[in-house]
Image (cartoon, grey):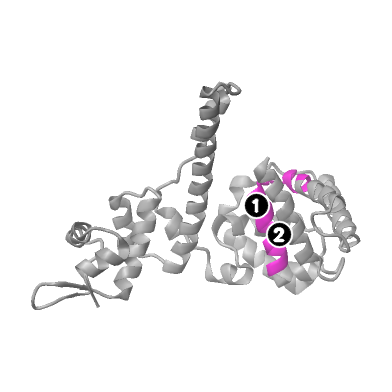
Amino acid sequence: MYKVQEVATIAGVSVRTLHHYDSIGLMKPSNIGSNRYRYYNDDDLKLLQHILFLKELGFSLKKIQELVAEGFDATYALTQHAELLRKKKERIEKLIENAELTQLEYAGGQELTNEERFSAFSIKKTDDNIKMYMDAPSPVSAAETGATGEAFAEQEEILEEVNFTEPEPAVAQQEEVAVEAEAAVATATKKPEKEEEDLEEINREGDRIYNAVANLMHLPPEAPEVQVEMKAYYHLLDRFYNCSPKMFRGLGDLYANDSRFARNIDRHGAGLSKYLREAMYIFADGLADA
């Protein structure tokens, strides 16, 4: 058990802040001693860590209270913390870059266009909607793929509709269950329906890319020959979906981590699914840096 002063020292917050969290019911001590001292245990400190993560992300105390009152999955919450903090990091890095370019401009360097001057400010700030913390993926789909939330739904639906290799019946049934469970949150990125002949063309091109990459596996995944195929693959998927670099990387993870899809892809070449993931990551990283 920790006294309030000890918690304040460990967490780097003030005693007054902890008293306030107690008074509003956000984080109450596990025990009040006969001397009226507040005592906190390890679980209390874990909750405090979540609160501080949310504060860092710009959530108001009111929003944090709503989340705590509703109850949340701490493991899933940490996944969201990390993802949102990465987005915040990217935004801050762009702001720093913008400030440095403007500093050079003031020192007599190249003049910025107005679009360049405000480009970093147009990046979306973190949304303080607690719904993103409440909508954890279903236990079945999360356990099967290692993916979470919307990214998982996007990946599953792509593999259901752009089925480059014909799965075995048992695999097809598993895919159908997974897609139906996640379809509601996958439609946001979906492009208009394609004609049947277009789907056949997409499937043929997908198989061509798989075979081509399988024949290039003696090269490192960053080799120009491999990355040419990754570019073709990215544009192929983008015909069907608004494929972002993040989504492309997530799809690579699904190929390598989900035995259902790895089994089918590896028919083109042993270990292709994992090699493909590495190549897709390299291509996506190049897009993100562009």
Task: Decide if residue 46 is on the left or right side of residue 178.
Answer: left
Q: Nearer the viewer, residue 233 or 81?
A: 81
Q: Quadrant of the C terminus?
A: top right
Label annotation for residue 247: 1
Q: Which of the numbered marks, if any, corresponds to residue 143?
A: none
Q: Secondary structure at mark 1?
A: helix
Q: Quadrant of residue 53?
A: bottom left
The residue where tag 2 is placed is 252
Question: Would residue 132 be counted in the magenta stretch?
Answer: no
Amino acid type assigned to the residue bearing label 2 in the image: Gly
Q: Quadrant of residue 181?
A: bottom right
Residue 256 percent coordinates (x, y): 72, 66
Callout 1 crowding tier (Cα within 10 Å): few <14, some 14–19, many ≥20: some
Question: What residue is drawn where x is 89% and y is 54%?
Answer: 208
Q: Quadrant of residue 242?
A: top right
Residue 205, position as x, y percentages in the image:
86, 51
At 74% from the left and 48% from the top, the residue drawn is 237
The N terminus, quarter of image:
bottom left
Q: Is residue 138 above or below residue 80?
A: below
Q: Position of residue 107 (x, y in %)?
A: 53, 24
Residue 252 lies, with reference to residue 262, above or below; the image says: above
Q: How many marks?
A: 2
Provide the residue span drawn in magenta.
Answer: 235-257
Helix, strand or loop under label 2: helix
Pointer 1 or 2: first along the chain: 1
Q: What residue do we see at 31% from left, 49% from top?
A: 60
In terms of secondary structure, what is the magenta stretch mainly? Answer: helix
The answer, for residue 172, to whether it is visible in the render is: no
The residue at the point 13 percent across, 77 percent down is 33
Q: Nearer the viewer, residue 94 or 170?
A: 94
Question: In this rendering, would 188 be left or right of 162?
Answer: left
Q: Amino acid at mark 1?
A: Met
